[in-house]
Amino acid sequence: MTSINGGVANHAIPTGEPALVVQDLSKTYRAGEPPVWSNVSFSVPRGQRVAIIGGNGAGKSTLLRCCMRLVEPDAGEVYFGAHKITGLRGRALSRARAQVGFVFQKHNLVHRLSVLTNVLHGGLAQRRSPRLWFQSVAPATDRRKALSCLAQVNLAPLCGRRTDELSGGQSQRVAIARALMQQPTMIFADEPVASLDPQAGEDVMQVFSDLAQAQGLTLVFVTHHLEHALRYADRVLGLQGGRLALDAPTANQSIAGLRGMYA
Amino acid sequence: MRDADDMTLPARFSPPGPVSIVAFLVFLSFFAWSLAAAGISISELVEGLPNMGHIASEMVPPATDRFWPMLSSVLVTFQMALVGTVIGIVLSVPLALLAARNHTPHRLVRSAIRSLVSFIRTVPDLAWALFFVASVGLGPFAGTLTLVMDTIGFCARFFAEAIEEVESGPAEALTALGAPNSAVIACATLPMAMPSLINTSLFALEKAVRSSVVLGLVGAGGIGAELATSMEMFRYDQAATIVLMIFLLVVLVEALSSHARQRLLKNRH
Ligand SMILES: Nc1ncnc2c1ncn2[C@@H]1O[C@H](COP(=O)(O)OP(=O)(O)O)[C@@H](O)[C@H]1O
Ligand SMILES: [Mg+2]
């Protein structure tokens, strides 16, 4: 299980070396329309927690998707560490994607399969074996690893449940466990708590924050909760008017100030 | 309140335009001609009534002399249907993936597979059966091949639609974590489509059991041959037994299939 920096648990202290670099990125969905945003550049040091804010349609999801190449950017480059992501294809692209745990607004679990099976799927990039398709045929080490990922989000007792029997907050934590199974160096989360009640949302954000701290993971999350941005991030990026209009440490930001991003 | 006099109700009927009148007259004359072509004849129906009564009375009591050979034919019929359906389903899954918008490697592949499947579906069962009897000879193998085609024509189409309707999020999540395409299909797309795939497959089995009955009429194996023989020998009592057996088989398969539907849809992995 290799990752570009040779492991996950060994860099609890942010070293200042970039985990994610975005250079002059631009995206237009349809020719003739104005770009969603253009010339977006920023660099995220390892272990940093970054919140992305901006109004509906500002292009926050598009930015995360372009970084993963789920959507192709028109211009610019993306690097994970020293590895250039833009231009990769096939297996090399799969391996690059595997370094990032992507958590969506909707948990996107396969609801007819068990919780343990869904978590096992996180290992599909590193181990391309069909034995990871279903927990019933998975090797014992992988099953144990999946269970320990579930334990990290406090859901080990639910490993045998069907996913559609879980609450929204539990589902989102299973999605986080699936991301952990990837042994990622970064976690991207696109409005991960937008469909949860306030308490469950707070719990999920706390899980992200604790994991980032404990494992030195780089965390990039999109949120509409400005208090989450201030509480759980070290830095805030704001998209507005087709450009990166804000890039500042959260320490000197206030909710009232951030409201300006929605004007 | 306003006076009802100064408000206009819409007309009860709007007069048809000249085009509709002509279209209607054309339809009417075509239908009259069709009545003649269909050979509808009240006198023949009336003359046929005693014959129908005679045949019906010959049918009771149903014959038991060929009970065991008939039962074994019914069993073969079901076995042909089962094997043909299972092989057809297995072949339909890859075809459906190639024909589904969200998994096809190329738009042209999609249209090519769709056309192929429509063609397979449009050719009638009996035409397939005659083709296979001519190519692989008389007997259940020809019937089984026919039912494979029958199943592909039905399942590949509905599987493709089920696959296209599956919510895209889970597949996208697995793509985002770097899973290979085969895993995305096996772990997200197919499990998400499973209830619909199971449902369609069970309908395919029911359909195959019903179609398998007539295949014997053209020598493609199964109970149909027994039925043809009994009718030719005027053994309407034997024919009655066969019809009853077919009826019981179809009812049994439909009951089992609806039971299986409920059980399978509850499973987890
Ligand atoms: N797949 C797509 N095709 C075309 N336009 C899209 C697509 N996805 C998003 N957009 C458009 O791009 C803009 C940014 O969308 P999005 O990134 O989802 O914004 P946000 O996540 O900030 O709400 C919106 O105007 C949206 O309509
Ligand atoms: Mg969004």
Image: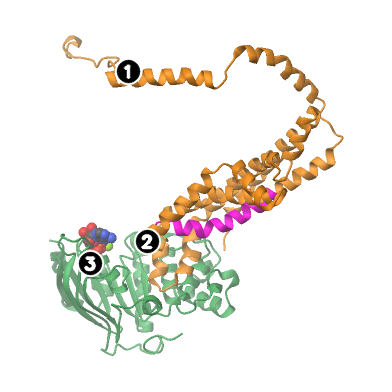
Furthest residue to the top? B5
| Secondary structure state at the residue bearing disc 1 | helix
Looking at the picture, does residue A254 appear above or below residue B256?
below
Q: Residues within 10 Å of mark 2 (few under 14, many from 20)?
A: some
B229 or A149: which is nearer to us? B229
Label 3 chain ID: A
Q: Position of residue A192 (x, y in %)?
A: 34, 66
Indicate the colour of chain B.
orange
* Residue to which mark 1 is pinned: B21
* Residue to which mark 3 is pinned: A226
* Mark number displayed over residue A106: 2
B136 or A99: which is nearer to us? B136
Q: Position of residue B1 (x, y in %)?
A: 18, 14
User: Is residue B85 within the magenta segment?
Assistant: yes
Amino acid type, label 3: Leu
Label 1 chain ID: B
| Secondary structure state at the residue bearing disc 2 | loop
Residues rendered magenta in the picture? B80-101
**Magenta portion: prevailing SS class:** helix
User: Whereabouts is ligand 2, in terms of quadrant?
Assistant: bottom left
Quadrant hosting residue B180? bottom left
Q: Position of residue A147 (x, y in %)?
A: 52, 75
Chain coloured green: which letter? A
Q: Residues within 10 Å of mark 1 (few under 14, many from 20)?
A: few
Q: Nearer the viewer, mark 3 or mark 2?
A: 2
* Mark number displayed over residue B61: none
| Residue at horizontal 44 percent and vertical 59 percent from the top | A167
Q: Position of residue B80 (x, y in %)?
A: 69, 49
Looking at the picture, does residue B245 appear above or below residue B198?
above
| Residue at horizontal 32 percent and vertical 89 percent from the top | A13
